[in-house]
Image: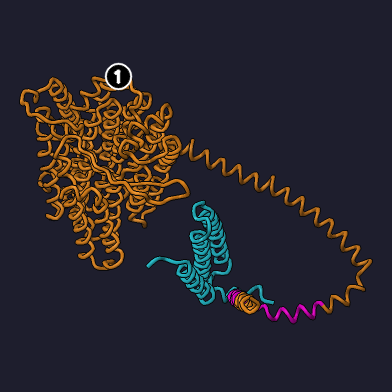
C-alpha cells in the first residue's frame, strides 16, 4: 500500500500546480475561493508527503526510484524519473508543512492587496516547482523545476510591479541566478556526454552510482564545480549573493517561503543530492571540489553575518542572516557533514520562516514600516509576535538545549573540527555563531525593547490568522529539537541511513559548552553594547568607518556596478561606436560609390538614350497605372489572393493528375 | 483507435485552415502573426507525420527538419514582432487595414 506512492510521487507537486491553474482559470475575482484552493492544494501535498514519508521509516537508508522514458530521439532515449529517499522525504515534509503555514499567514498579510488571488496562484506555482526539484531523480528534471522555481521567485519578488525598486530587484535576482545556472547547465551537458545518463539512481547505472562515477573519472571535479556554481547562484553564496537581500522587495510571506525556507536552500539540497560527484576520489574526505565548497561557504557565512550587524531594514537583517546560515550549511557539506548540513537546512526552514513571518507581523502592525530604528517597545503592543520571535531568535542563535538550531549548529561545529586540511573554518564558524547571536540581539533590542519611537506608537497585534502560524512554527522549532539531540540523533541517522539508538549519556558533549559560551558571549555583549541604542547605531558611534563599510554591504554592489555592469556597458558603447563609425562609414562609402555611378548613368541617359526610351516608358507607365489599381495596400487582400492562387494550383494539379 | 497518417494530415489541414482564416480575417497585426505561426505549426506537423509514417522512421530526419523550421519560425516571430513595434511607434496603430501606405 505504501509503495503505491513511489510511481505516483508526481502527485505531490501536481496538487499545488492544479491549485495554481484553477485559481488562475476560475477564481481570479473570488478572493476566498482563491485562498481556499491554494491552502487545499498545500494540505493535499502535505498529506501525500506524509504517505511518502512512511515507507522511508521502515528500514534505514531505504531508497526507491521510478524511472521512465520521456522521449526517444533516434538511438538515444532520454529517461527521467523520481526518487524517494530520506533526503527527499524530509525535504517534502518541511516544504509542504512550512509552506502550508506561510499560505495561511498570507491570507492575513495580503488581505488588503488587490491582486490577492494572483499572489496565491504564484505561491502555489512556486510550491509545485520546489516539490518537483526535491523529487527529481534526473538532473534534467531537476534543472527544469529549478528554472521554474527561479521564474516563480522572479514573479513574486516583482509582485508589487508598481514599485520600481521591486521590478529592479526581480530583474537582478533573475539575472544573477542565471549566471550560476549557466554553470549548472554546462555541468549537466558535461555529465551527460561523459556518463551517458542524467538519472541519479538507476539500478547501478545512474550517474551517482558505481558505473556512472567510473565513466566520469577525473572530470567529476569539473562537473561538480559547474553544478556548484548553480548552487552558488540559487543559495546566495559569495560572490553571487547580491540578489538575495534585494529580493526582500517582495511581500514578506514570499521572503519567508522562497528566500528563507525553501528555494535558497535548494542549492544546499542540490549539493547534497549529487554529493557522490563531489566526493569521488576523496582522500580522508577531502577533494578539490569539496574544498572549494568549504571556502565559499566560510567567506559567505562570515561576510553576511558581519553585514547583518549594520543593516537597519528588519527584513534585510534576516536576509543577510539567511545568506550566512546557507554559507554555514555549505561549509558543513564541504567538510563531510552532509546530514548535519541538511539537518540545519530543515531546522533553518522552520525558524527562519518563523522569523520572517514574525517580521511580517511587525511590519503589518507598524503600518509597513521596515526600519528597525523607528520601532521599539513592541513587546507590550505585540506580545504573541514578541514571544514567537524570541523563540525564533534563540533557535537561530543556537541557544542550547531547547531549540532546534542549537543541535544542528553543534553538529556542524563538530564536523568542521574534524576537517583535516585546516582549522580555520572551525574557528571562523565559531566566530560566526557569536556574530549571529550579536546581530539578532541587536535586532530584538531595537524592535521589541526600549521605548516606542515614531510610528510604532500606533502598532497593533496582528489578527489570529497571522499569529497562529507563528505559534505553530515556534512550537516546531522547539519540538523538532527532540529528534536532533546527540542523545537521540534520529534525524541525523535517518538521513545517513543508519539505525538509531537512545543514549542519554551522549546528550552533553564538550561542544555543547563551547556553543553555550559562544552564544552567551554574543547575546551578553549584544545586550551590553546595544542596551542604550538610539537613533545612531552604537557601532557607528564607536567605529564609524567599520559601520559605514558594513552598512554599504562592503560596497560589493558598487564593485559589481563598476566592473561587470560597467564593463558590459562599455562593450555596448564600443559596439555602438563601431556600428556608427566603422561599419556606417563602410556603408556610406559603398553608397557614395553607387551615387557616383548614378550620376554617371544620369549623364549617359540624358545625353544619349533619353528620347528613344521615353515612348516605351509611357507605355510601361500606362500598364503600371493599370496594375497599381490592384494594389490596395491591404496586406490581407494580397494574402487572400495568394490563398486563392494556391487553391487554383492545387485544383489544376488534381485535374491534371 | 490507431493514429493513421490521414488523421494527422486532417488535423494539420484543419490547423492550416484555422491559421489562414486568422491571418485573413483578424485586423490586429499580432493576431495575423499568430495565424501565420499556426500555419507553420501545421506544416511542421506534416513533416513529422510523413516522417513517422514514411519508409525510414528510425533516422531522425523529420524531427531535424521540424526543429530547424521551428528555429526559423522563432527568428521570424522575433523579426515580425519587432516590425509590429516599429510600425506601432511610427503610425500609432497596429491595425493592418490602416496601414495602406504602399497602395498603388
Report the front residue among A285 and A367: A285
Report the front residue among A317 and A273: A273
* Residue A134, x across and y down, in percent: 28, 44
Chain B on-screen colour = cyan
In the displayed orientation, state which residue is furthest to the left: A504
Element at badge 1? loop
Look at 41% across and 51% down and name the residue there.
A71
Query: What span is colored magenta in the figure?
Result: A620-643
Name the chief secondary structure element in magenta.
helix
The chain letter under disc 1 is A
Chain A on-screen colour = orange
Q: Which residue is mark 1?
A: A284
Look at 41% across and 31% down and name the residue there.
A215
* Residue A476, x across and y down, in percent: 12, 42
Q: Quadrant of residue A59?
A: top left
* Residue B97, x across and y down, in percent: 57, 76
Snapshot colouring: by chain
* Residue A645, x across and y down, in percent: 63, 76
Drawn side of residue A402 relative to residue A612, left or right:
left
Residue A344 in sight from this viewpoint: yes
Amino acid at each position: 500500500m505504501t509503495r503505491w506512492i513511489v510511481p505516483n510521487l508526481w502527485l505531490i507537486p501536481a496538487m499545488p500546480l492544479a491549485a495554481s491553474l484553477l485559481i488562475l482559470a476560475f477564481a481570479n475575482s473570488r478572493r476566498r475561493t482563491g485562498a481556499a484552493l491554494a491552502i487545499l492544494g498545500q494540505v493535499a501535498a502535505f498529506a501525500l508527503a506524509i504517505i511518502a514519508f512512511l515507507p522511508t521509516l521502515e528500514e534505514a537508508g531505504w531508497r526507491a526510484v521510478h524511472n521512465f522514458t520521456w522521449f526517444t530521439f533516434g538511438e538515444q532515449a532520454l529517461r527521467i524519473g523520481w526518487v524517494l529517499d530520506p533526503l527527499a522525504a524530509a525535504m517534502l515534509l518541511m516544504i509542504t508543512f512550512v509552506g502550508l503555514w506561510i499560505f495561511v499567514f498570507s491570507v492575513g498579510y495580503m488581505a488588503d492587496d488587490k491582486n490577492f488571488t494572483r499572489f496565491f496562484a504564484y505561491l502555489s506555482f512556486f510550491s509545485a516547482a520546489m516539490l518537483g526539484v526535491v523529487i527529481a531523480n534526473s538532473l534534467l528534471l531537476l534543472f527544469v523545476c529549478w528554472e521554474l522555481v527561479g521564474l516563480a521567485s522572479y514573479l513574486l519578488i516583482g509582485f508589487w510591479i508598481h514599485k520600481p525598486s521591486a521590478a529592479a530587484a526581480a530583474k537582478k535576482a533573475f539575472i544573477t541566478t542565471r549566471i550560476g545556472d549557466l554553470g549548472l547547465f554546462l555541468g549537466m551537458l558535461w555529465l551527460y556526454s561523459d556518463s551517458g545518463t542524467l538519472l541519479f539512481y538507476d539500478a547501478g547505472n545512474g550517474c551517482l552510482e558505481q558505473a556512472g562515477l567510473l565513466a566520469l573519472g577525473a572530470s567529476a571535479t569539473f562537473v561538480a564545480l559547474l553544478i556548484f556554481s548553480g548552487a552558488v547562484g540559487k543559495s546566495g553564496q559569495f560572490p553571487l549573493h547580491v540578489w538575495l537581500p534585494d529580493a526582500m522587495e517582495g511581500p514578506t510571506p514570499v521572503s519567508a517561503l522562497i528566500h528563507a525556507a525553501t528555494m535558497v536552500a535548494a542549492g544546499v539540497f542540490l549539493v547534497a543530492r549529487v554529493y557522490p560527484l563531489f566526493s569521488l576520489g576523496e582522500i580522508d574526505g577531502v577533494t578539490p571540489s569539496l574544498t572549494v565548497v568549504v571556502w565559499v561557504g566560510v567567506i559567505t557565512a562570515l561576510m553576511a553575518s558581519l553585514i547583518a550587524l549594520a543593516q537597519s531594514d528588519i527584513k534585510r537583517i534576516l536576509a543577510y542572516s539567511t545568506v550566512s546560515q546557507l554559507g554555514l550549511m555549505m561549509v558543513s557539506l564541504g567538510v563531510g557533514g552532509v546530514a548535519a548540513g541538511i539537518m540545519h537546512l530543515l531546522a533553518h526552514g522552520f525558524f527562519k520562516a518563523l522569523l520572517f513571518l514574525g517580521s511580517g507581523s511587525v511590519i503589518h502592525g507598524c503600518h509597513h514600516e521596515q526600519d528597525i530604528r523607528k520601532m521599539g517597545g513592541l513587546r507590550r503592543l505585540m506580545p504573541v509576535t514578541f514571544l514567537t520571535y524570541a523563540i525564533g531568535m534563540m533557535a537561530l542563535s543556537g541557544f542550547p538545549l531547547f531549540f532546534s538550531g542549537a543541535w544542528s549548529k553543534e553538529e556542524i561545529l563538530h564536523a568542521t573540527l574534524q576537517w583535516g586540511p585546516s582549522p580555520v573554518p572551525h574557528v571562523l564558524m565559531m566566530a560566526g555563531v557569536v556574530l549571529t547571536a550579536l546581530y539578532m540581539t541587536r535586532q530584538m533590542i531595537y524592535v521589541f525593547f526600549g521605548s516606542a519611537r515614531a510610528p510604532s506608537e500606533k502598532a497593533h497585534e496582528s489578527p489570529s490568522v497571522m499569529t497562529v502560524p507563528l505559534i505553530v512554527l515556534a512550537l516546531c522549532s522547539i519540538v523538532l529539537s527532540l529528534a536532533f539531540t546527540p542523545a537521540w540523533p534520529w534525524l541525523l541517522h535517518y538521513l545517513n541511513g543508519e539505525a538509531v539508538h537512545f543514549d542519554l549519556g551522549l546528550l552533553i558533549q564538550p561542544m555543547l559548552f563551547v556553543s553555550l559560551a559562544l552564544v552567551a558571549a554574543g547575546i551578553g555583549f549584544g545586550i551590553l553594547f546595544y542596551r542604550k541604542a538610539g537613533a545612531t547605531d552604537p557601532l557607528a558611534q564607536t567605529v564609524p568607518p567599520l559601520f559605514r563599510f558594513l552598512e554599504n554591504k562592503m560596497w560589493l554592489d558598487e564593485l559589481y556596478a563598476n566592473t561587470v555592469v560597467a564593463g558590459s556597458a562599455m562593450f555596448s558603447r564600443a559596439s555602438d561606436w563601431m556600428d556608427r563609425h566603422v561599419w556606417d562609414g563602410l556603408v556610406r562609402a559603398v553608397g557614395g560609390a553607387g551615387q557616383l555611378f548614378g550620376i554617371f548613368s544620369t549623364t549617359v541617359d540624358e545625353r544619349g538614350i533619353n528620347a528613344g526610351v521615353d515612348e516605351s516608358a509611357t507605355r510601361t507607365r500606362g500598364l503600371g497605372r493599370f496594375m497599381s489599381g490592384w494594389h490596395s495596400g491591404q496586406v490581407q487582400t494580397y494574402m487572400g489572393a495568394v490563398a486563392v492562387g494556391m487553391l487554383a494550383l492545387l485544383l489544376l494539379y488534381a485535374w491534371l493528375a | 483507435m490507431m493514429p493513421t497518417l490521414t488523421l494527422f494530415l486532417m488535423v494539420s489541414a484543419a490547423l492550416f485552415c484555422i491559421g489562414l482564416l486568422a491571418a485573413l480575417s483578424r485586423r490586429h497585426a499580432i493576431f495575423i502573426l499568430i495565424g501565420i505561426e499556426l500555419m507553420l505549426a501545421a506544416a511542421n506537423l506534416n513533416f513529422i507525420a510523413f516522417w513517422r509514417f514514411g519508409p525510414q522512421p528510425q533516422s531522425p530526419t523529420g524531427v531535424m527538419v521540424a526543429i530547424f523550421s521551428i528555429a526559423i519560425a522563432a527568428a521570424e516571430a522575433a523579426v515580425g514582432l519587432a516590425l509590429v513595434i516599429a510600425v506601432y511607434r511610427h503610425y500609432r496603430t497596429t491595425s493592418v487595414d490602416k496601414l495602406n501606405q504602399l497602395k498603388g
